[in-house]
Image (cartoon, rainbow, N blue to C red):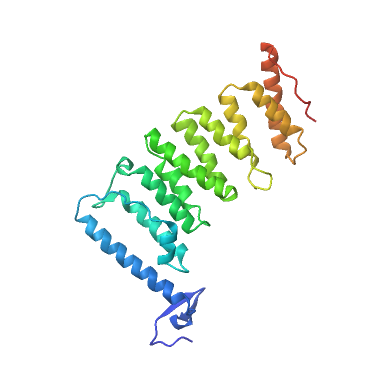
């Protein structure tokens, strides 16, 4: 039992002494405390001063050198600090005040600092892209694309969100198709639901490119890939409708017959 004279903490209902912590963990806790105190001090200075613009992002290697062995912790703390950039004297500032070029640099730098995290992509798509400014939305889509190409398995969901941003926020259907095509063209080794790959078909429909959509569906149905019954019925129904529409217009191309 832990000594009553020494601080204790509880794990799964059992009291454990802080002396039970592994030795290697103490430097990380000290670093976390130091960074937190430095952040509080910095924020205290900002609160009494005019709004400070987002500084340029340092190189990931520079940050890594400042926190050997604890880059994940440092990346998490810096992401929290980044989110506080739009807060001035307790009031939320419009994202239009942020320099999105520097913001993009920070998101990519912090991703390189901790490649196992999806949080930079989440911030890009769910937070900083939610602004009525096409240039800023495009910059966040570029960040998402960069993350996606570095690790498609981790970031495919953010790429689907980028497709929706291009379609609904930018009204740029060609960009939406380009992003959706990058999802559809991923190798089968990247595991994701069929609906993510089917976004290309929806984008083709939005653009009225019925013949391309028809060829895509026929290719999927004859590819020999494992497609569940619901998905197969959806594709077959869509194929039939496209064939009927194109037949009426006299534009029906020759395509492989689906099984």
Q: How many discs appear?
A: 0
Residue 98: image quadrant is: top left
The answer to whether residue 83 of the structure is visible from this angle is: yes
Q: Nearer the viewer, residue 206 or 102?
A: 102
Q: Position of residue 18 (x, y in %)?
A: 44, 80
Q: Residue furthest right?
A: 259
Q: What residue is rendered at 43% in x and 50% in y?
A: 107
Rendered-image quadrant of the C terminus:
top right
The correct choice, above or below, for 65 with respect to 156 in the image is below
Q: Position of residue 254 (x, y in %)?
A: 75, 20
Q: Nearer the viewer, residue 206 or 137?
A: 137
Q: Is 241 on the left or on the right of 142, as rendered?
A: right
Q: What residue is rendered at 69% in x and 44% in y?
A: 188
Q: Position of residue 206 (x, y in %)?
A: 56, 25
Q: What residue is rendered at 51% in x and 47% in y?
A: 147
Residue 179: image quadrant is: top right
The answer to whether residue 155 of the structure is visible from this angle is: no
Q: Is 180 on the left or on the right of 141, as rendered?
A: right
Q: Nearer the viewer, residue 138 or 95?
A: 138
Q: Position of residue 248 (x, y in %)?
A: 68, 12
Q: What residue is rendered at 42% in x and 75% in y?
A: 27
The correct choice, above or below, for 258 with respect to 38 in the image is above
Q: Nearer the viewer, residue 250 or 108?
A: 108
């Amino acid at each position: 039992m832990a000594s009553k004279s020494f601080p204790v903490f509880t794990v799964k209902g059992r009291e454990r002494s802080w002396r039970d912590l592994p030795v290697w963990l103490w430097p990380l806790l000290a670093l976390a405390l130091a960074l937190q105190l430095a952040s509080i001090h910095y924020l205290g200075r900002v609160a009494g001063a005019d709004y400070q613009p987002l500084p340029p992002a340092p190189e990931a290697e520079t940050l890594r050198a400042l926190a050997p062995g604890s880059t994940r912790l440092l990346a998490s703390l810096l992401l929290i600090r980044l989110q506080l950039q739009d807060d001035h004297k307790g009031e939320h500032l419009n994202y239009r005040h942020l320099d999105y070029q520097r913001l993009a640099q920070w998101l990519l730098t912090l991703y390189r600092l901790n490649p196992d995290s999806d949080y930079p992509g989440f911030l890009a798509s769910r937070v900083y892209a939610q602004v009525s400014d096409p240039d800023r939305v495009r910059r966040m889509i570029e960040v998402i694309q960069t993350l996606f190409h570095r690790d498609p398995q981790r970031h495919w969901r953010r790429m689907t969100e980028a497709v929706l941003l291009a379609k609904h926020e930018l009204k740029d259907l060609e960009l939406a198709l380009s992003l959706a095509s990058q999802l559809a063209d991923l190798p089968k080794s990247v595991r994701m639901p069929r609906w993510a790959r089917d976004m290309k078909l929806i984008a083709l429909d939005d653009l009225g490119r019925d013949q391309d959509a028809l060829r895509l569906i026929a290719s999927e149905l004859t590819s020999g890939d494992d497609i569940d019954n619901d998905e197969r019925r959806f594709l077959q129904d869509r194929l039939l409708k496209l064939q009927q529409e194109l037949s009426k217009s006299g534009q029906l191309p020759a395509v492989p017959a689906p099984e």
